[in-house]
Amino acid sequence: MDNGRNSAFRNTLNFAVMQIGAISVPIYPTISQEDYRHILNHAEVKMIFIEGKDLRARLEPIMPTITSLKEIFTFNEEHSQYKILDELIELGRQHPHPDELTKIKASIESNELATIIYTSGTTGVQKGVMLSHSNLVNH
């Protein structure tokens, strides 16, 4: 998630998520709290990356209702109760496992799920469009 601005961090994060076989679920920052709740629970999101204090303030009230949620990171808010993305990056630097990463990347099949893009929900609740790695590269 982000605040709608273009961000090199966001793109790097998406690539990192996909190269370890995890699934990226980008979400528009302007949807309602109920829409966030639906998407985050429907996609069974385990980690959230939030950019911006305004978005964090909108999400905080619903976070306890996201049953699959394990970790919350902010992009740069040092005075937040959540971890900062830089902490995750530093953890990776301190504990590199390049051979394991190479094995994980090699095991990902092109037909495996890479991302779920949710529709705007103009005809009801948002529906997740599932895209494979092949969909992203070839189409």
Image: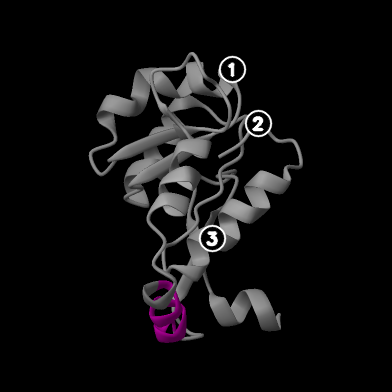
Q: Residue at x 61, y 78 (%)?
A: 135
Between residues 41 and 18, which one lies in front from this camera angle? 18
Q: Secondary structure at mark 1?
A: helix
Q: Is residue 116 visible?
A: yes
**Magenta-tinted stretch:** 101-108
Instruction: Work out which quarter of the rendered image holds the N terminus and state it.
Output: top right
Label 1 crowd (10 A; few <14 / some 14-19 / many >=20): few
Tag nearer the camera, 3 or 2: 3
Q: Secondary structure at mark 2?
A: loop
Residue under label 2, please give it. 3
Q: Picture coordinates of residue 76 (x, y %)?
A: 58, 27
Between residues 47 and 32, which one lies in front from this camera angle? 47
Q: CA distance from mark 3 to mark 2?
A: 19 Å
Q: Are marks 2 and 1 in contact (CB under 8 Å)?
A: yes
Residue 105 is covered by the magenta coloring = yes
Q: Picture coordinates of residue 62 (x, y %)?
A: 35, 24
Q: Quadrant of residue 107?
A: bottom left
Q: Who comes first in sequence, dot 2 or dot 1?
A: 2
Q: Residue at x 58, y 82 (%)?
A: 134
Instruction: Work out which quarter of the rendered image holds the C terminus and state it.
Output: bottom right
Q: Secondary structure at mark 3?
A: helix
Tell whether 32 sits left or right of 107.
Answer: right
Picture disc at residue 6: none
Picture disc at residue 54: 1
Residue under label 3, please give it. 16
Q: CA distance from mark 3 to mark 1?
A: 25 Å
Q: CA distance from mark 2 to mark 1?
A: 8 Å
Q: Are marks 3 and 1 in contact (CB under 8 Å)?
A: no
